[in-house]
Amino acid sequence: MDIIKNPWLILSVLFIYFSPNCRLSFGADTISANQSLSGDQTIVSSNGDFVLGFFKPGNSSNNYVGMWYGKVSVQTTVWVANRETPIRDRYFSELKISNGNLVLFNESQVPIWSTNISSTSSSSVVAVLEDSGNLVLRDGPNSSAPLWQSLDHPTHTWLPGGKLSLNKRTNKSQLLTSWKNSEDPAPGLYSLELDPSGINQYLILWNRSENYWTSGTWDEQTRIFSLVPEMRLNYIYNFSFVTNENESYFTYSLYNPAIISRFIMDFSGQIKQLSWLESSKQWNLFWSQPRQQCEVYAFCGAFGSCNERALPFCNCLRGFQPKSQDNWNLSDYSGGCERKTKLQCEDPSPANGKSDKFLESPNMVLPQGAQSMTGGSISECESTCLKNCSCTAYAYDSDGCKIWIGELLDLQQLAEDASSGKTIYIRLAASEFSSSSNNKGIIIGAVAGSAGLVLGLVMFAILKWKRRTMKIPKAVEGSLVAFGYRDLQNATKNFSEKLGGGGFGSVFKGTLPDSSFIAVKQLESISQGEKQFRTEVSTIGTIQHVNLVRLRGFCSEGTRKLLVYDYMPNSSLDAHLFHDKNSKVLDWKTRYQVALGTARGLAYLHEKCRDCIIHCDIKPENILLDADFCPKVADFGLAKLIGRDFSRVLTTMRGTRGYLAPEWISGVAITAKADVYSYGMMLFEFVSGRRNSEQSEDGKIRFFPTWAASLITQDGDVLSLLDARLKGEAPVEELSRICKVACWCIQDDETHRPSMGQVVQILEGVLDVNLPPVPRSLQVFDDNQEHIIFFTESSSSQSSQAQSNISTASSQAKSSTSTMSS
């Protein structure tokens, strides 16, 4: 009665209820039979970790029932009930228990979503939101067995404790399906599932049909998926794979439950593992696959082109425009592009003008679905396509004529210098070509044709001269060239100009008849037979990356085995870091770019090749610099190739003292993490500009990594570590990042070291890195600095003593624990 007499109280209650910034909560984690959710009401898990209620994604006008984190300041949705059937008015919609199910009724009281279990006559059914992020339907609050749970019906987020399974009896897989875009949680084109064929591996599919990524099979011994070596860094996550007669599934948990982490199938087509950083109030990317955005199948949709070097990644081909500009503004390119002008064959009226033409698009990755046609020339190939109105493009190369019918999917634009790029000709309406450009093309063609004959005669004369002076090399597999020994002897002036030498042999400068410079390595102690040598060289020749020295060819004549590489005019990194008399001091910007480029090259060897290639001898002498000081990793592939099971022990290969990981000495299996250790040791030399164990003026040896690691962990002045020749000119943030990464890379336990892929992401600023612990081996060095004898080439007894010291440090390091948060 008092309430009726007080209209201001009624207005206050109504104002609070309808206020968009206020959420009323039951203050409980349960929806019982006599309760419902509507408007801004929510339920919250007992510890406040998760919230369930109505929400609007981004600027969308649609409402959904979903679950989000309760302790994350940025609303992050992890599960959506009605992702395909949004509601307009959340205040007149209800989520409640009905006939033993949890049911969502829209504003017209029509049920649009339900847990959809067999009806139960029980009136005690409740829905409980647990702190694991699991919404559970139970037959009474004290029942332990769930009638239904949201973890069995994931949307785009895979929470710790959840599983993605394959039901072996029904052959039905649970799916993790992306949103359409950031404002539409409806199922998108990309999904993750366990291989329905029964192979224990996960697949990412486009449109449930095109598989473009796989985890590789599960290895029970190493407890990782074969193509996800990053799983070895299991200091945050505990992985489990279960298979029995009923089902197979993978699940994971967190060693530290205080960490907030989620695994998502993103609408970018990538799977991502993210962790919440409270300090920066943002989600931090820990891991993603595929690594390159353009590796996602059809990411840019029909008639869209993906370019890794451009932002945004997607652009419509010339003559096309986005089908939905609104979606493109939300980074949803899946709808692709449409023609600006109809083709003449589609609208043959006289007003439509001339017949269709073709736009030349070079340096492209050709789309799938090509049809091979008979055509003896490029003009015949074009004519074949032009006669079929459904033909949208053609290509002509050494493999003959190919045409494409209908939409073009998965087009990729490569860099101009990419060797694998192809040319495709896109069909467009004639009006898309200006007449001036046509006239210009005719003029250029005429001039080119006139000059062609003269140029041909000149080239014929040059070729004839070359044949007299040097035997024409024969091409073998790929782009490698088989040189004759006498040819290389002439090119190097009888091996007179030595560039350097190493464990595999000496290197000499040479000049080919076309005036290009080469580096010729004379291999020593090569015991392989001819067939094995050619096989391994062929494998190395297929490995090409901007940060790897390119192998141009080889020579194999009896016991003479030589490799021919591109010549690097700026020599090796050690000449610039340690020998300041004859070279300009490298500034910090160049050093950082060299460190990043080297990491990219190693990441490619470890993670992108068919077989993981472990370098085994990373040091400044094996980092070469081209004319622009772009780093190139040399001597890769000369150590043994190791399969991705990482289980074989290398007994015949050894790296360089001072860069060797402890596992070399302890005799355990060598993995790619041995290269990570060597890279970390080299990073310290990037900072100091001198050898790590360089003798000081007073005759004592001060081990730089020990000093640097101690200073980093004590939050000291990192600029004091910098090469004095740089006079403090280096960004403190970059210097600190390099030092932290270096310290993580040289952890005694290889499982605590990051992968080179993670190192790349850290140096690029994509991932953050926490303070590392001081490796136990460095602590031992610090405690016994006066008694440590570092490796020297002149004394075997000293070398043995050093090995003993490192072995002791390595064994003691097993008790050290560390956590690197990226």
Image: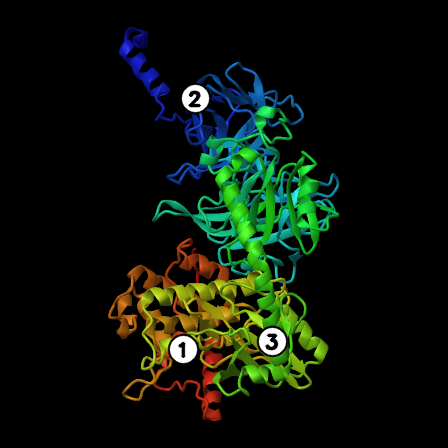
**Percent of width and height locating residue 98:** 58, 20
* Residue hosting label 3: 466
Which badge, 1 or 3, comes first in the chain's sequence?
Answer: 3
- Name the amino acid type tagged 3: Lys
Which badge, 2 or 3, comes first in the chain's sequence?
Answer: 2
- Name the amino acid type tagged 2: Gly
* Residue hosting label 2: 39
* Residue hosting label 1: 574
Q: Nearer the viewer, residue 128 or 552?
A: 552
Q: Is residue 414 visible?
A: yes
Q: Is residue 266 visible?
A: no
Q: Quadrant of the N terminus?
A: top left
Measure the C-alpha gap from mark 1 to mark 3. Answer: 37 Å
- The structure residue drawn at horizontal position 62% and vertical position 23%, both measured from the top left corner, is 122
Nearer mark to the viewer, of 1 and 2: 1
Which badge, 1 or 2, comes first in the chain's sequence?
Answer: 2
Query: Dot 1: within a 10 Å radius of its alpha carbon, few (fewer than 14), some, or many (20 or more) residues?
Result: many
